[in-house]
């Protein structure tokens, strides 16, 4: 009897709600990233900015779920994981398209970003990827140092708000470097783009500590990249037929 | 003889270097806008951000001038005011357009922005425009309060870095508002738009005081607008739009000092 009730509740839950995003806690304490990212920045960035993106995304998904337009297709899309929804923005009506591009993108980007950061190493030089990821970086960029230089230059030169990404390109299956404006994410451009690392270049990411000195933030960012996590993300990428 | 002098004058003006922008001083002390905008924020915004735009714009203008591929007209253009350059941005080669929109735009926008601010009034409500500007606002938006609501709403909706602008529209000659991303300015879209007032919505414009609370910044912004100065810009703008005839065909040559290419000498 209880089993039946539980099953019924699960069934109802599956059918009757859109995706509702939750706020994952930081993997470490707010203070853990000092002195590269201050506790103050982490509290604002996670508890305010990330939180706001989550709330606004949930509001859009809630509205979309009960929207009967497009023969119930909107309802179906609203039930998908956020990563999938963001690959289908082009089919959405105006009122949801931008809201999800901005806030859903903001949610996904920040969820990703916080997952790849850790306590700083003492120096930049000692924090490096290894194994398959390092090999793939060397294949695409020559050396890790060259990649570091290019990624940093792109980050310093990006104008306005945006991100710089390292991702497996959908078509070439190679690691590439690119930037996106605002809260755009590479999967919005091709669902098979696979992000392994990124840096938030919105001013809110660094202003309380670095003020206008973005270059200093970018230089120190290399001390907090968690290459173990990034390496694992890379290893877990979907294997293409071309890899075999 | 006269023709020779003209010719010489034209040659000399052709060799003239590009304009060199300087950092305009704040029209008030760094702490004058407290508590709406803190002294620290103003120091950063003016001494760091505006300085960076100034330096960046100058670098680009010099590069454009030194570029051996640049025509004489283009070189002549680099000697004009930044307002003129940006209102004719479409004449620039693509490679310079992007950078000048960013850094030249950043320079112009911040120069204007700082000039339209003043010591805060105690409340937002008591700070209002009067005279012809108020009439124009009422004509375009029904009432000042409606204008304020729209401008505020749009300011909260802007996503990423950008501005919301109030300007005199080139065609209708009426007031209009628009939002711009990054450092875009209405004059980049039509040289006869007259930009009157803007709110900087880049995070650097409010973060040191308001952190993520942009709505608090926007609410308080109404206390620091220098309406008498904006009114002056309005009056001057109306006069300019009335006087200006479209000099599209020969305007560029006249403004670039008449280097001989098209002047027929």
Image: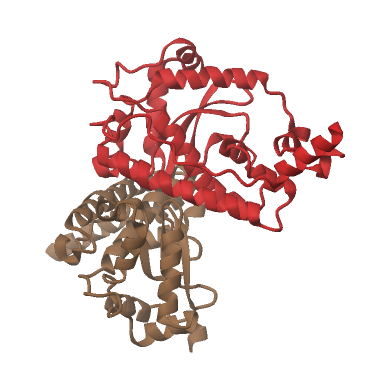
In this rendering, position of residue B114 left or right of residue B79 = left
- A41 in relation to A219, above or below: above
Q: Residue at x 17, y 57 (%)?
A: A39
Closest to the observer, B66 or B148: B66
In this rendering, position of residue A239 left or right of residue B85 = left
Q: Is residue A194 visible?
A: no
Quadrant of the frame with the N terminus of chain B = top right
The residue furthest front is B1
The residue furthest left is A2
Residue B232 % position (x, y):
48, 18
Residue B5 % position (x, y):
80, 36
- A80 in relation to B228, above or below: below
Closest to the observer, B172 or A51: B172
Q: How many marks?
A: 0
Instruction: Report which colour depicts chain B.
Output: red
- A243 in relation to A121, above or below: below
Residue B14 % position (x, y):
72, 45
Quadrant of the frame with the C terminus of chain B = top right
In this rendering, position of residue B150 left or right of residue B89 = left
Closest to the observer, A219 or B221: A219
Q: Is residue A180 visible?
A: yes
Instruction: Report which colour depicts chain A.
Output: brown
Display colour scheme: by chain
In this rendering, position of residue A31 left or right of residue A84 = left
Residue B75 % position (x, y):
68, 48
Which of the 4 quarters of the picture holds residue B89?
A: top right
Q: Residue at x 46, y 14 (%)?
A: B138
Closest to the observer, B152 or B68: B68
The residue furthest top is B131
């Amino acid at each position: 009897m209880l089993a039946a009730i539980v099953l019924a509740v699960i069934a109802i839950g599956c059918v009757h709600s859109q995706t509702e995003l939750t706020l994952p806690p930081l993997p470490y304490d707010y203070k853990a990233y000092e002195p590269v990212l201050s506790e103050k920045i982490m509290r604002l960035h996670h508890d305010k900015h990330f939180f706001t993106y989550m709330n606004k995304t949930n509001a859009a998904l809630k509205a979309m779920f009960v929207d009967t337009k497009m023969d119930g297709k909107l309802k179906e899309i609203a039930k998908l994981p956020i990563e999938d929804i963001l690959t289908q923005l082009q089919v959405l009506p105006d009122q949801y398209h931008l809201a999800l591009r901005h806030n859903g993108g903001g949610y996904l980007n920040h969820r990703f970003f916080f997952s790849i950061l850790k306590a700083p190493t003492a120096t930049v030089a000692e924090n490096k990827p290894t194994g398959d990821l390092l090999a793939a970086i060397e294949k695409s960029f020559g050396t890790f140092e060259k990649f570091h230089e290019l990624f940093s230059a792109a980050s310093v030169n990006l104008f306005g708000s945006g991100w710089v990404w390292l991702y497996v390109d959908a078509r070439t299956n190679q690691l590439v470097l690119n930037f996106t404006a605002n809260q755009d994410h590479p999967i919005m451009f091709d669902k098979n783009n696979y992000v392994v690392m990124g840096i938030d270049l919105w001013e809110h990411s660094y202003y309380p500590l670095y003020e206008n000195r973005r270059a200093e933030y970018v230089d120190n960012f290399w001390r907090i990249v968690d290459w173990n996590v990034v390496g694992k993300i890379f290893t877990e990428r979907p294997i293409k037929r071309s890899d075999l | 003889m006269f023709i020779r002098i003209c010719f010489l004058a034209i040659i000399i003006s052709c060799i003239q270097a590009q304009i060199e922008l300087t950092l305009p001083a704040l029209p008030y002390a760094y702490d004058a806008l407290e508590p709406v905008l803190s002294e620290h924020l103003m120091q950063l915004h003016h001494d760091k951000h505006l300085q960076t735009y100034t330096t960046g714009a100058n670098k680009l203008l010099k590069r454009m001038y030194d570029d051996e591929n640049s025509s004489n007209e283009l070189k002549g253009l680099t000697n004009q005011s930044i307002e003129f350059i940006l209102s004719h941005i479409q004449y620039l080669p693509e490679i310079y357009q992007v950078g000048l929109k960013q850094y030249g735009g950043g320079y112009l926008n911040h120069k204007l922005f700082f000039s339209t601010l003043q010591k805060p009034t105690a409340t937002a409500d008591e700070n209002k425009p009067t005279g012809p500007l108020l009439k124009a606002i009422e004509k375009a938006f029904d009432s000042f309060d409606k204008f304020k609501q729209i401008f505020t709403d749009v300011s909260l909706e802007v996503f990423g870095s950008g501005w919301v602008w109030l300007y005199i529209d080139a065609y209708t000659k009426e007031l209009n508002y628009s939002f711009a991303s990054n450092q875009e300015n209405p004059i980049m879209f039509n040289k006869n738009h007259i930009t009157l007032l803007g709110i900087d919505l880049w995070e650097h414009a409010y973060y040191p005081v308001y952190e993520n609370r942009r709505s608090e910044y926007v609410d308080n912004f109404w206390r620091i607008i220098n309406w008498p100065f904006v009114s002056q810009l309005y009056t001057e703008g109306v006069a300019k739009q009335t006087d200006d005839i479209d000099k599209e065909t020969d305007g560029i040559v006249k403004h670039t000092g008449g280097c001989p290419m098209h002047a027929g000498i």
